[in-house]
Image (spheres, rainbow, N blue to C red):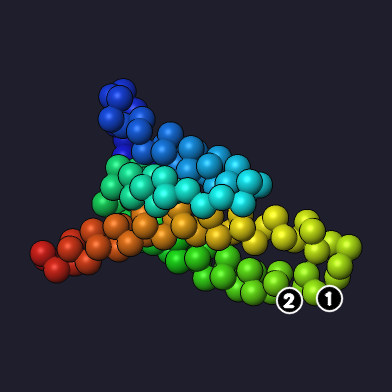
Amino acid sequence: MVKKKNTMLGKIGPWAFVLGLIIAMVSAITRQVFWMLGVLGLVVGLMNVSDKELSHYLLASLTFLVSANALSVTLTKLVGIIPVVGQWLNFIDPLLANITLFVAPGAAIVALKALYNLAKD
């Protein structure tokens, strides 16, 4: 994270991340998709990732996005096989989708920033 903890601007990124995760969880419960998740993801990508953290953030984002997609497919198949656990699994799938909606815009912004840094050198 960018080390600007003393300024108000430096606190927006971490709070946007926490708020995004909370909104993703609440919206999974209510089965609503909020556009605010994408906007908060952009804020996190723009304000919360320093140049030193680009590769770590991109690796973590990519890992999460790929594994969430694979887990979502697996859970969809398990819902039909295990009916007792199916209702609990039906909560996890929208949660993964909402967190993906939150993480993907930030990852795209950080990837563009990394590409720009590579191209300017």
Helix, strand or loop status at disc 1: helix
Helix, strand or loop status at disc 2: helix
Q: Is residue 55 left or right of residue 88?
A: left
Label 1 with label 2: CB-CB less than 8 Å: yes
Residue 102: give x, y in percent of width and height.
Answer: 45, 53
Query: Would you say residue 6 is visible in this rendering?
Result: yes
Q: Mark 2 points at which residue?
A: 77
How far is disc 1 from disc 2 in space, using C-alphas?
7 Å
Query: Would you say residue 49 is visible in this rendering?
Result: no
Please tell me which residue is depicted at 40% across the width and 56% down the height of the picture. 57
Please tell me which residue is depicted at 47% across the width and 48% down the height of the picture. 34
Q: Is residue 79 left or right of residue 25?
A: right
Q: Is residue 63 above or below residue 22?
A: below
Q: In this view, does 9 lie above or below 62?
A: above
Is the residue marked by circle 1 packed among few (<14), some (14-19), or many (20+) residues within 10 Å? few
Name the residue at the left extreme: 120
Q: Mark 1 points at which residue?
A: 81
Residue 16: give x, y in percent of width and height.
Answer: 41, 38
Q: In which quadrant is the C terminus drawn?
A: bottom left
Q: Which of 83 and 117 is in front in this view?
A: 83
Name the residue at the right extreme: 84
Q: Is residue 72 left or right of residue 78?
A: left
